[in-house]
Image (spheres, rainbow, N blue to C red):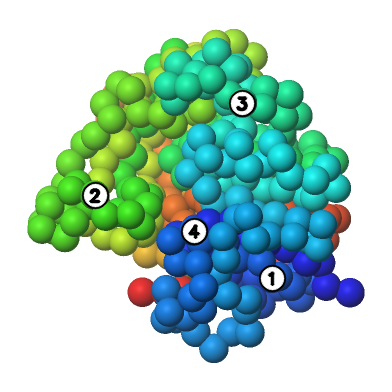
Amino acid sequence: MAFKIGIMGASGYTGAELIRLLALHPKIEIKILTGERQAGKNIGEVFSHLGGLNLPKLCRMEEVAWDKLDGVFCCLPHGNAQLVIRDLPSQLKIVDLSADYRIKDPALYEQIYGHAHVAPQLQKEAIYGLTEHYRVSVAKARIVANPGCYPTAAELPLWPLLKARLIDPNQIIIDAASGMSGAGRDPKLGTIFSEVSENFSAYGISNHRHAPEIEQELSLAAGQEIKISFTPHLVPMIRGILATIYVKMGSGVKIDDLRQTLMSAYQEESFVRIVPQPPSTKDVKGSNFCHISLHEDRREGSAIIVSAIDNLIKGASGQAIQNFNVMMGWKEHLGLQTLSFAP
């Protein structure tokens, strides 16, 4: 019997990717798609590549019969997501793709997002969904907070190295670049073609909202508080994240020690690959893979790590499905085998 799910915010990029992937999931039936401004339309009218699928029309949130569902993927903006999830029936399995349940400290959340959290108890209950490192907790969770795209690209390579105490936790620089789909589908001046084309720009310097999320998780791995230097950039492409990470190795540590630690940490993982050459965003486009390479820096005792993901898949919808599969006790790759993607 198919597990009935709803996708809230299905008219955005992450919602569309969830539909594309879940349409091929052998254990899931999509019963509800919400999209406030697109309510009443078929999904094919919003995303033509999804036309022809036997799916319900987009509806408004107040029209949803939550008791008819078994699970929900929430693709609403931060702030809105917590309001909706707070009032959902307790029997629902929930994966939230917003930032609302990622930050564990309510005071820090308020500082970052400019408003108090309306569901602090659920904030404590939610499990951070970096699947490869929280799998056991995710399997028992009712609510999973899907990690951000930049944090996923940074945390996967750094977590095992910090846990093994092979790198200096006080000397981490993350220089990351993302495609424009990470900014969402709503039109904004900074994301229109004439602003983005033939341009490469840094933004959110020293104050990007993903930095505290990365620091929260890396601090847990290291067993001490960590502050990172993190600079995100916008690239004139649609999708993908490439993170170049600079680290200082511990005394007596060699680049092969880092490589062997990562290979050992991820040798049984389906979606993390340690590769010999620097990965590119095309290497992972449309997939749930994270490719990681390691390189000795010209500075003695330092190393450069390169990490590539598709921001809409491993950085959002694919990891959400991976987490949901774990929550349900299913094989982790279900719904994630296809490598086709929308242009």
Q: Amino acid at mark 1?
A: Ile
Instruction: Give the residue number, with chain letter if any, for mark 1.
Output: 30
Residue 136: image x %, image y %?
Answer: 81, 39
Distance (Cα) linking label 3 and label 1: 28 Å
The answer to whether marks 3 and 2 mark residues whose Cβ atoms lie closer than 8 Å is no
**Quarter-wise, where is residue 225 in the image?**
top right
Question: Nearer the N terminus, badge 4 or badge 3?
Answer: 4
Question: Nearer the N terminus, badge 2 or badge 1?
Answer: 1
Tell me, for residue 188, which label it has, or none: 2
Distance (Cα) linking label 2 and label 4: 19 Å
In-image side of 343 versus 88 (left or right)? left
Tell me the mark number nearer the camera, choosing from 3 and 1: 3
Question: Nearer the N terminus, badge 4 or badge 1?
Answer: 1
Which residue lies at the image location 28% right of the left edge and 30% below the top edge?
A: 204
Instruction: Give the residue number, with chain letter if any, for mark 3.
Output: 118
Q: Amino acid at mark 3?
A: Val
Q: Quadrant of the N terminus?
A: bottom right
In-image side of 239 versus 21 (left or right)? left
Residue 253: image x %, image y %?
Answer: 51, 23
For label 4, count other residues whose C-alpha is less than 10 Å away and answer few (under 14), some (14-19) or many (20+): some
Instruction: Give the residue number, with chain letter if any, for mark 4.
Output: 36
The answer to whether marks 4 and 1 mark residues whose Cβ atoms lie closer than 8 Å is no
